[in-house]
Amino acid sequence: MSQPVQRAAARSFIQKYINKETLKYVFTTHFWGPVSNFGIPIAAIYDLKKDPTVISGPMTGALVLYSAVFMRYAMAVTPVNYLLFGCHLVNECAQLGQGYRFLHYNYFTDEEGRKAIEEKWKKTD
């Protein structure tokens, strides 16, 4: 690409994405609330690879309900907060995965299977 074309592309990008409205949005709670809240789904995704014997069923259930409520809230506020919706959508999926692991381990695995799972996780600790 020639330099004038690169300059024009950069100028176009800056005018489109780095403007007063974008900067105003970055300094609002509409932006920082969901950004800071992304720690929950990141932790939940990370926990999907951990020992299923330590999953808390009540906490997982509470987080599933919490994310469902806030996904609805994100769509009800004006203006619609898609970042908050996305954060809670990711969390909902991760928590449902944790819930599946909890139910599978505690209610659908026989005693032999539980012992095998416990042994597997003892070796990796």
Image: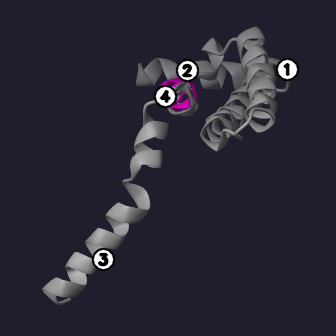
Mark 2, residue position: 119
Which mark's residue is nearer the viewer, 2 or 1?
1
Bounds of the magenta segment: 33-42
Place residue 67 in its image quadrant: top right
Place residue 77 in its image quadrant: top right
- In the foreground, 9 or 71: 9
Residue 1 on image: x %, y %: 20, 89
Mark 1, residue position: 107
**If you read the primary sequence from the N terminus, does the residue marked by circle 2 or circle 1 appear first?**
1
- In the foreground, 17 or 65: 17
- The answer to whether marks 3 and 4 mark residues whose Cβ atoms lie closer than 8 Å is no
The residue type indicated by label 1 comes to Tyr
**If you read the primary sequence from the N terminus, does the residue marked by circle 2 or circle 3 appear first?**
3
Which residue: 41% across, 58% down? 17
Residue 43 on image: x %, y %: 51, 26
Mark 4, residue position: 32
